[in-house]
Amino acid sequence: MRHISKILRTAAVALVCAAAAFASNAGAQELKKIKALIPIPNFDESFSPVAVALYLGYFKEEGLDVQILPVRGSNEVAIQISAGNADVGLASPADAIIGMQEGKNLDVQYFHNLYYQNIWPISVPATSSVKSVAELKGKKIGVLSMGSTGISFGRAYARDAGLDPAKDVTFIPIGVGAQALTAIRQQVVDGLVFNDAALAKFGVLGLETRILPVSEKLRDLPDTSILAKRETLAKRQKEMIGFARAVARGHLFSIQNPTAAVKITWKLYPEAEPKNMPPAEALKQGIAVANARLAIWSSPKTKGVAGAFVEEDWNNLVTFLEEQGLLKQKIPTSRIYTSALLPEINKFDREKIKKQASEFKIESIK
């Protein structure tokens, strides 16, 4: 009898273990697979909230198994999403709006605003006597390349300051890194239109810059935000809400603890960590890049609502594209974005995230 009882107990234990394993597997299977695109070929600290959401399990807590795929730019993100090759993406809206015109019919719509300012400020070296864009008349402005988006913004800034961008300023491609630093220090150019992350890196390398004031209309042009196919937004609302909410949580954590956000980014994407400088300098640069971008992930105009769209700013973006000759038809904001999912996206415990960030131990990242 004792032998039979032992067998029964062993069988019961095995049954319990099997049931637990089955439940665990079932739970794992319940995660909805999401393929998400970001508009850079190599992940870096500027998208640290996404890395944080992945590392800390925010996506999993939303029932999602998210695969992050970097691609070459926002235009590719919009095209691939519209074609159904990915589920959701982060992308600058200019190319997407252009693709929404009749005849192109790009099938995407934004549903969560991320950047509340454009990432292309116009600046000068901190030692420059230039205090306004108008004072750049007759001067040279450095850009990454002649295909850089910075040229479009540079022209708009010049025009807004009363200059003729075709005659009063000259755009000079100066590349990146040491090449760009040399051109600036040797005064090959007088001003710059580089993205905020590049300016942060210049600062760490010893070149301080000063951003010139521009009109609020141009400064607050919305940039990278979250989009999906309209059909996806209609049929997979819960997944889209969960994705955006996890990113919003990742942003709040990153704002509270940028050092941890950078370290987490490097843990998941080792290629993002600079290898050509001492670790302390690398971390300083990573935090500078993260902070430069995190600063524009929110706006007082939204009154604390994560991802809210500011209609005036989006209308200004449409006007900007028209003035640049990039848009032949006026696209209504109702076609460009929807606010329908925002109430649910904003249902998360902000104090809990802040507490998690303040108590997070850097040494736990292994």
Image: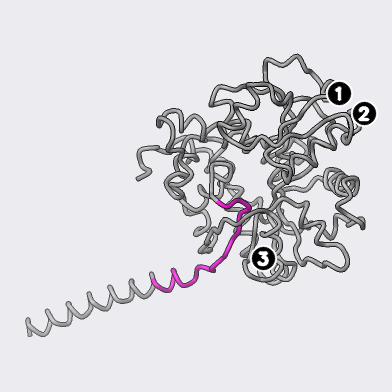
Q: Are marks 1 and 2 in contact (CB under 8 Å)?
A: yes
For disc 2, the neighbor class at 10 Å (few under 14, some 14 to 19, many from 20) is few
Q: Helix, strand, or loop for circle 1?
A: helix
For disc 1, the neighbor class at 10 Å (few under 14, some 14 to 19, many from 20) is some
Separation of residues labelled 1 and 2 (CA atoms) = 7 Å
Where does residue 145 sit, x and y in percent of width and height? Answer: 69, 41
Q: How is the image coloured?
A: one colour
Q: Are marks 3 and 2 in contact (CB under 8 Å)?
A: no
User: Magenta residues, as a range?
Assistant: 25-41
Q: Residue furthest left?
A: 2
Badge 2 amino acid: Gly
Dot label at residue 292: none
User: Is residue 242 toward the left or the right of residue 216 in the image?
Assistant: left
Q: Is residue 30 magenta?
A: yes
Q: Which residue is mark 1?
A: 134
Query: Quick one: label 3 or label 2, which is nearer the N terminus?
Result: 3
Q: Which residue is mark 2?
A: 162
Q: Helix, strand, or loop for circle 2?
A: loop
Residue at left offset 14%, top offset 82%: 7
User: Is residue 116 toward the left or the right of residue 38 in the image?
Assistant: right
As drawn, 328 above or below 366: below
Query: Quick one: label 1 or label 2, which is nearer the N terminus?
Result: 1
Q: Which residue is mark 3?
A: 80
As drawn, 181 above or below 313: above
As drawn, 272 above or below 68: above
